[in-house]
Amino acid sequence: MHRRTSLLAAVGLLLGATTAHAQPITEAQISQIIAAPDRTPADRTNDLRRKPERILAFIAIHPGITAMDLSAAGGYTTELLARAIGPTGHVYGQSQPRDPSRPIPAPAAPEGNSNPNLPPAPAAAAAPAGPPRTSPIMLADREARMHAAGVQAAPIVAVPRPFADPMPPELADAKLDLVTLMFNYHDLGHMGVDRNAMNQATFRALKHGGLYVIGDHSGRPRHRHLRSRHPAPHRGSLHAPGSRSRRLQTRRSRQLPAQSQ
């Protein structure tokens, strides 16, 4: 058996001075967000590997800001942002529109069950037949569930746009306080996405003092046959004039099947 160590690296690019807002949410508030009884079992399973308490503390979210979650997918991070930012702010969840010329992909495993060493979340009831559950549909479901539970969360707006041009016109010019991209920056490279164009569009959309946070994985050098990659190559395209960065790393490991040499 090989053991792989995975690093969670969040790189924040702070453009100049810190944006003026209320004080960031406290550790106690973060704990309350994560322990909220209306969160789904799948999200709680995802917490075991995503370490949301550390990520939210690292970002130091201020209530009332405007945030964009790039590659929102099922909305795990988007919902956490909405809870942390609160009803006086706004949260957008970007996702790449599906190419109508390509066949509909098979349903993915329930969010939170991608790590075989973690206990699976309880199986959900089979979804009724109908159109594919796109990211905008899943984000709307999350917002409706929080509203039904009386959660004081920021409204979530779905943004179906290509990765290389992710910002709608109303946000494209210094309108965002925070942009997040969690755990698939490397996948965008495999997909042929122009990540430099995406990053530059993100910098243009950030206010002075805005924060761009990327979480991704890395593997040990001898395990380069694995999909995870070291975060260092990413930083070449993560540059804006006057920017600076900071990093957070958390370690986790899991057993992998033996690989042929």
Image (cartoon, rainbow, N blue to C red):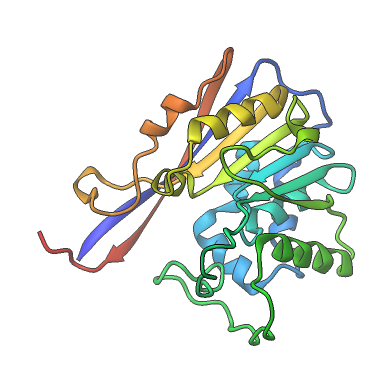
Question: Relative to the observer, which residue lies in front, 138 or 118?
Answer: 138
Image quadrant of residue 31? bottom right
Q: Tell me residue 77's x, y (percent).
A: 64, 53
Image quadrant of residue 177? top right
Relative to 127, residue 248 above or below = above
**Whether residue 29 is visible:** no
Q: Tell me residue 87's x, y (percent).
A: 88, 48
Image quadrant of residue 171? top right
Question: Relative to the observer, which residue lies in front, 57 or 113?
Answer: 113
**Residue at 69% across / 52% down in the picture?**
78
Question: Relative to the observer, which residue lies in front, 250 or 216?
Answer: 216
**Residue at 49% across / 59% down in the picture?**
49
Q: Quadrant of the C terminus?
A: bottom left
Judged left or right of residue 176, residue 57 is left
Judged left or right of residue 215, residue 168 is right
Q: Quadrant of the N terminus?
A: bottom left
Judged left or right of residue 239, residue 19 is right
**Residue at 42% across / 43% down in the picture?**
189
In the picture as drawn, the residue positioned furthest to the front comes out as 101
